[in-house]
Image (cartoon, helix red, strand yellow):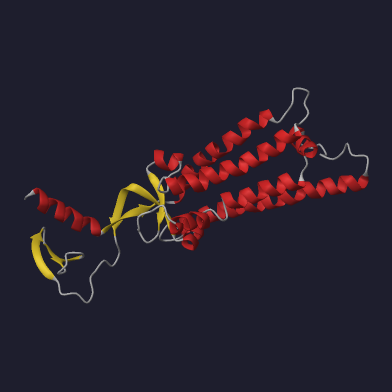
Amino acid sequence: MSKNSEEFWINLYNMKQKNRVVGFWYRLFIILMDLIVALSLPIGFSVLVIKPNNTIDNLGYYLWSFSIIIWFFLYWVIIPFLFRGFTLFRWIFRTKLALKNNEESKLNLIWFIAILKNQTFTSLSWIVIVFLSMTLINPELAFRIASSTPGNNLVSNQNNQTQKLIDQALIAIPSTFSTFLVFLNFFIIITSGIRKDSLTIVEVFSKTKLIYLNKFEEKPNFKIENEKLIPVSYIKNKIIFINKNEEDIYEKK
């Protein structure tokens, strides 16, 4: 068989294949690894906000909050957009985010919107919570939260009862949203384990999928309709057909 013929048959075979969608456990592991990377930078830079005398730097607090917003958007949206669906651990474990219709992920508005939709209830929602926390919680209260120990009242040193209630409300708003979002994110991941196609509900919404780079499966119900098929070869008890313009194939045992 000539090299051109071999390439032709390989291309025909590849037309029937599609990348497998990543399942629940492997997906959860990759997300957790990426989450560690995404959180390591904000946690590391948080030490720059605390002054040597155990007070908090006001400007540093707001710069730190904005850096979290920028970093989250960069890691979960911009990097996957520019690098065809990869994050650090997606790349390490040979998986990537792709469009559901198997189109190539080009640097265009369709691909960018797909990523934004995919991150609507994850990183983008966390960005909103960080912004909400930065707006509602002032640097002094944030420092008391960070330096508190279990069982201590975060606002116990306030003499004004009204101020205590205000501080408690300011803490409760982002805390409540954060708790809800944690459960929502976990539920989203779980949906990949209960659906037959292994897609999460967010991937269905965004028309994306997390796929393996080196694991494949046959496309279901692959066939050609309303075409005049021409038999061109007989390989391993299968008759290989192509249509006239050699764009599609069909196998018949």
Is residue 149 visible in this depiction of the protein?
Answer: no
Residue at 29% over, 55% down: 217
Estimate the x, y position of residue 94 in percent, counting from the top left.
37, 43
Q: Quadrant of the C terminus?
A: bottom left
Residue 122 appearing in the image: yes
Q: Considering only vertical position in the picture, is 170 above or below 227?
A: above
Asked whether 187 or 229 is in front, the reply is 229
Left or right of 216: which side holds 64?
right
Please provide percent x and percent y for residue 132. 70, 49
* Point 41% across, 45% down: residue: 83
Who's the residue at 63% across and 31% down the image? 45
Image position, residue 72 (x, y; %)? 57, 44
Q: Is residue 215 above or below residue 224?
A: above
- Relative to residue 186, is residue 219 drawn left or right? left
Q: Position of residue 230 (x, y in %)?
A: 11, 70
Farthest residue toward the top?
A: 52
